Structures are given as C-alpha cells and as structure tokens.
Amino acid sequence: MDHQHHEHAPDRPGGRRARSRWWAAGLAGMTGLALTAAGVTAGPAADAVAHTLTSTGSEGPHGSSAEDDRGRPDDGKHDDKGKDDKDREEKGKKPKGVPVPCKADALIAAITLANARGGAILDLATKCTYLLTADIDGAGLPAITTPITLNGGKHTTIKRAAGVDPFRILTVEVGGDLTLNKLTITGGHTTDSGGAILVNAGGALTTNHSTITYNITGAAGGGISNFGITRINRSTVDHNTAGSSGGGIVSTAVLEISKSHISANTADLGGGVSSAEGAVRVERSAIAANHAQSLAGGLLMESGVGIVADSRITDNVSTSSGGIFLGGGQFTLRRVTLARNTSSENDGGGLRSNPEASVVIEDSLVENNTAAAAEADGGGIYSAGKLVLRHTKIIGNRAGDQGGGINNESTSVATLFATKVVRNIAVVEGGGIFNEGGTVELNPATGTVVVDNRPDNCAGDVPGCAG
C-alpha cells in the first residue's frame, strides 16, 4: 500500500516578532543568548492536544539514550532501533505519548501546551514533514522551556519552508530539556547563532538517531549552537554552514558526541566542531570531510578540556590546521585515526597546537596528513606546547617545508614512548622530526623508532635519532 509524504504548513501564519540578535565577534567574545519564550495562542489544535494529553495521562518526557558500548569507531550505519526501543517492544511497554497530527500548527500548539503543563512526550507522525512558515521569536517553533521529547519515526522531518523569513528551527531556553528521537531537522536559516538549534545556558539537548542537515547561519553553529549541555547520540550532523565558527556544532559549555557522524560541514573556523571553552568528549564517532576557510577543518578547541576516543578525524581541509587546532587547554586522543587531513596554506596537516596546549596521543594512528604549502611545517603534527605520544604511529605524512611527521617548535616539549615515526616526507629537512629549538625525548628503550623518512629522519637537536 502506497503512503503519501505530506508537507504541512501552519494554516494561519502569525505576525513576525522582534528578535534578539547575537553577532559573532571572535571566539574569545562568545557569550550566551537569551531569547524570550514564545507566546503562542492555543487554538483548536491545542484543545485537541490537551484532550489527548489528559486521556493518555502523560506527565513528562522520557527520552531514550544510546547505550554505552565501547570498541571500534562507528561505521556511520545508525540502526533505527536502539537497545531501549527494542527492550520496550519486547516487553510491550512502549511509553505513551501525545500524537501530533501532520500539521505544523498542531506541533506548535502541542509544544506550547507542553511548556504550560511542565513537559510532555510528543509522538510526531511518520512519513511527514512539518513545514514551518512563521517566525516565533527567531525560531519556527516555540522556545523549549520544560522537559519535552519529540519522537519521530520513518521519514519524520521538521523543516523551514523555502522563501519565508529566515529563522532557526528550535531554541532551548533555561529549564528546557529537549530530546529528539528519530527526527530530521533541516532548512534553518538565520543571521543569529544556531542555524538549526540554539541551546542557551541552563538548557539541554539530546539527539538520538536524528539528523541535523542543510542549515545555515551567518554567525556561529551552522547546525547547533550550544551554551548549555548538548549530547549527540547515534546521530548525523552534516552539510551545515556557519559564517564564523562551528560549521556543524559550536559549543562554549558541555558537548558530548557518541556514535555519530559530523561531516561535510563548512565554516570560517572549525568546519566540523568548534569549542571556545568548556568540555568536549567525542567517542566512537567520525569528524570527516569538513571544511574551514581559515582554521581547523575538523575540530577546533580554543581552551578547556577535550577527549576524543575510538574515533576517526579524517579528510578535513582548511587553509591552516587541516584536522585539529588546539589553542590551549588539555586535549587527549585515545585509539584515534587522524588521517588524510590537509592544511593547504599553513602549518599542521593533521594537528596543530599553541604553546598553551597540552596534548596526549595514545594508541593512535596519524597517517597521510599534509601541510601542502612550500613554507608549511608539520605534515602530521605541529606542536608548540606540550606533547606526549604513547604507542602511536606517525606514518606517511608530508610537509612542504620541515617536519614531515612532527615539527617541534621552540616552546614545545615532545616526549615519545613506544612510538613509530616512519615513511614521512619533508621537502626541506626533518622528514621524520624537525626540532626547531624545543625539546624532543625519544625514549628509544621503550621501542620508539624513527626510520625510513625522507630526506632524513631528524633535523635539529633530536638525541637518539639516527640522522
């Protein structure tokens, strides 16, 4: 039996409201944004939702979260059903939610009523596009101010209609806790922060099995702008664009990415993910094929604490720092593949760090990254801070000038344990390691080897390296 795919816009678009503005003024100047909660008059659609809410006895949301399993990086094949969903189906205890008809007005009314009643689970229609046409304080839907879960299903989409005034899709305010399950969020377009979703300080967002795609902002956070707590689980954030930082996601607070793909996003700084401060944890995920015009094609961390584990950062491109740029703070890579990233005009094909950064790389592979320009250093790693490598392979990287595998600046202390630096190339010198006046400790007794690099293994003062 054939099913039609419906797109429904509100029957009576409301008047445009004044909106708060936030303009990016550089990473150091990023601050939270407080938007006024939308005041939407509840009409017949709200009455219908209220009746359903009362009859189902639903009092609050219960969002599902991805299970915490460990191992290889996610292959990007996000199964439709999480463990919690399967368990509930087997037990026949699917949580009751409020059904929301395939009409944008019905969704607006349902969220308005859920905010007024302290939260709800809302079950959106499958094979439905909720097409938004009205600007409600900068977003297409009312601001989330209570715990609300939006459950989608097969081909459930929330989309801004083409040709209408620019606005993002969702804003999460103080006290709001939004969970998205099996939803696609697309078409957001704004000059403010957060092309698709803005999470303000005191708000929280969790995405499960969802896609944030083809959203645009002239400011920061093409897909998501986070000033609160954001968790991305088994989801995809791709093909989003930011005018300043964070093509996929920008964060100044707590960001967790698990079993997800951040790919094909574009920004001036931090093509995939940009964190100005706070904490970032990425596990069993991929940050791949993102592009930054100025700095950090894949991941940018200005300060704070960052951990990437069991993940891939690959095929990202920028004019400077193709894969990762670290301005400061503490950063750890564990069981990570950092490969095929390109810095087209400056240093650091795979990773580049400033003097204020401390970097630990363990059980990882740094392979086939390129600092392509004639005067670019550090094909694999360009370190100006503290660098510790343990049980890691630096293989096949290339620099247009010095330090094909590793370029160690005068401010850097690089310590290697059981690490292999092999088959890297520098056009001028230091095919394996170039030490530009800093300190390099190879610790060969642990199994560190620097061999088969061109035109030489090491240049500068690298004790224990055979030329």
Image (tube, rainbow, N blue to C red):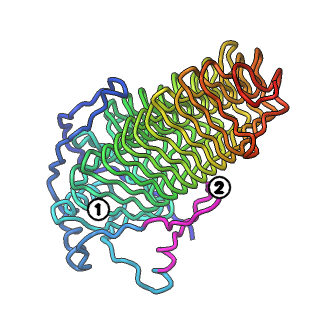
Circle on res. 62: none
Q: How far apart in space, not on screen, are marks 1 and 2 (Cα)? A: 30 Å
For mark 1, does the 10 Å Cα neighbourhood hold few (<14), some (14 to 19), or many (20 or more) residues?
A: many
Identify which residue is drawn at 76% across, 14% down. Answer: 428
Q: Amino acid at mark 2?
A: Asp
Q: Main secondary structure of the magenta part?
A: loop
Residue 201 locus on image (x, y percent) = 26, 45
For the image shown, how many numbered marks are present on the structure? 2
Q: Quick one: 405 or 106, which is closer to the camera? A: 405
Q: Residue at x 27, y 45 (%)?
A: 200
- Element at badge 2? loop
In magenta stretch: residue 81: yes
Quarter of the image with the N terminus is bottom right
Residue 375 appears at what percent x and percent y?
66, 13
Q: Is residue 232 left or right of residue 339?
A: left
* Residue nearest the observer in this picture, 130 or 11: 130
Name the quadrant containing residue 79. bottom right
What kind of residue is marked 1?
Ile
State which quarter of the image contains the C terminus: top right
Residue located beneath label 1 in the image:
148
Residue 86's place in the image compared with 200, above or below, is below
Name the mark nearer the viewer: 1 or 2: 2
Image quarter for residue 113?
bottom left
Q: Earlier in the sequence, mark 1 or mark 2?
A: 2
Q: Which residue is mark 2?
A: 75
Please give left or right for residue 28 compared with residue 59 in the image.
right
- Quarter residue 221 falls in: top left
Q: Which residues are magenta?
A: 65-87
With respect to residue 122, does 214 lie above or below? Answer: above
Q: Position of residue 288 (x, y in %)?
A: 60, 41
